[in-house]
Amino acid sequence: MNPNKYTTPILYSFRRCPFAMRARSALYFSDIKVILREVVLRNKPKEMLDVSNKATVPVLVLKEKVIDESLDIVIWALKTNDKLNLLNPYHKEKDKIIKFINQIDNQFKYHLDRYKYSSRYEGCKSFEGKNKHRDHAANYITEIERLLKKNKATYFYDNKLSIVDLCIFPLIRQYRIADKKWFDDNTNFIHTHKWLTTILELDFFKIIMKKYEPWREASMPQFFASNL
Ligand SMILES: N[C@@H](CCC(=O)N[C@@H](CS)C(=O)NCC(=O)O)C(=O)O
């Protein structure tokens, strides 16, 4: 059965999910309009689970296929239309940048979750304590700091916005939000702070963070597009 009866792609999304934020960022920069279905994570729609048994957002439903990994959505969108050449580092150093993004998505995110949502992990065997996980995650920020400092840059690659910035900023933003004062006062994070602030002040950020009502089967389509 065709999972999408519309000609417009459908994006199952969750506003604050860093992976969905990265997908919406790429869709924004590729000028791809989608029908956005805001998901309540504890009550995921059957329509989404029917097309992807991973049960995570984001999920992009095209006429011909379903893409249910955020990085794949980013790459698909930018390959479709990349007027700003955001894929430049991917074309030039694919393995290196995918490895870097994967590290943030996995190792960094592991500690981020235990720092930001520490109460969920109290009593778990592998839980080392909120601040220990904060400090483990900080090692990745140190690496980000080193890269930005080394290149004397605001952005990661060629000092221009790219897939690397779009993919990792939502996770670093979450890390800051866990304790803004601690992050902002940390003199070891000066370049990362500037980088994050610069990104959050770009026009696209307001658009990708627009609020949508949770989707129900009877809902009228709500659209997400760069010009909305
Ligand atoms: N590797 C996936 C991870 C996506 C992910 O973990 N999304 C979270 C929300 S941020 C989710 O849907 N979790 C399922 C749940 O909370 O039930 C991707 O990059 O798309």
Image (cartoon, rainbow, N blue to C red):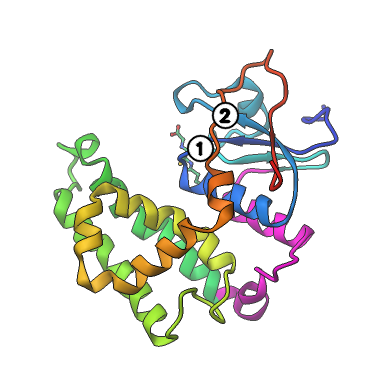
Drawn side of residue 160 relative to residue 136, left or right? right
For mark 1, what is the residue? 15
At 82% from the left edge and 38% from the top edge, which residue is drawn? Answer: 63
| Extreme residue toward the top, this view | 218
The answer to which of 38 and 112 lies nearer the viewer is 38
Q: Secondary structure at mark 2?
A: loop
Prevalent SS, magenta region: helix
At 30% from the left edge and 54% from the top edge, which residue is drawn? Answer: 176
Drawn side of residue 40 relative to residue 45, left or right? left
Residue 69 is labelled as none
Span of residues in magenta: 67-95
Dot 1 alpha-carbon crowd within 10 angstroms: few under 14, some 14 to 19, many 20 or more: some
2 drawn magenta: no
Quadrant into which the N terminus falls: top right
- Measuring from the top left, give residue 15's x and y in whole percent: 50, 37
- Measuring from the top left, give residue 115's x and y in whole percent: 24, 48
- Measuring from the top left, give residue 83's x and y in whole percent: 75, 66
- The three-letter amino acid code for the residue at tag 1 is Arg
- Measuring from the top left, give residue 65's x and y in whole percent: 77, 42
Q: Secondary structure at mark 1?
A: loop
Residue 70 vs 35, above or below: the answer is below
Residue 212 is labelled as 2
- Callouts 1 and 2 close, C-beta under 8 Å: yes
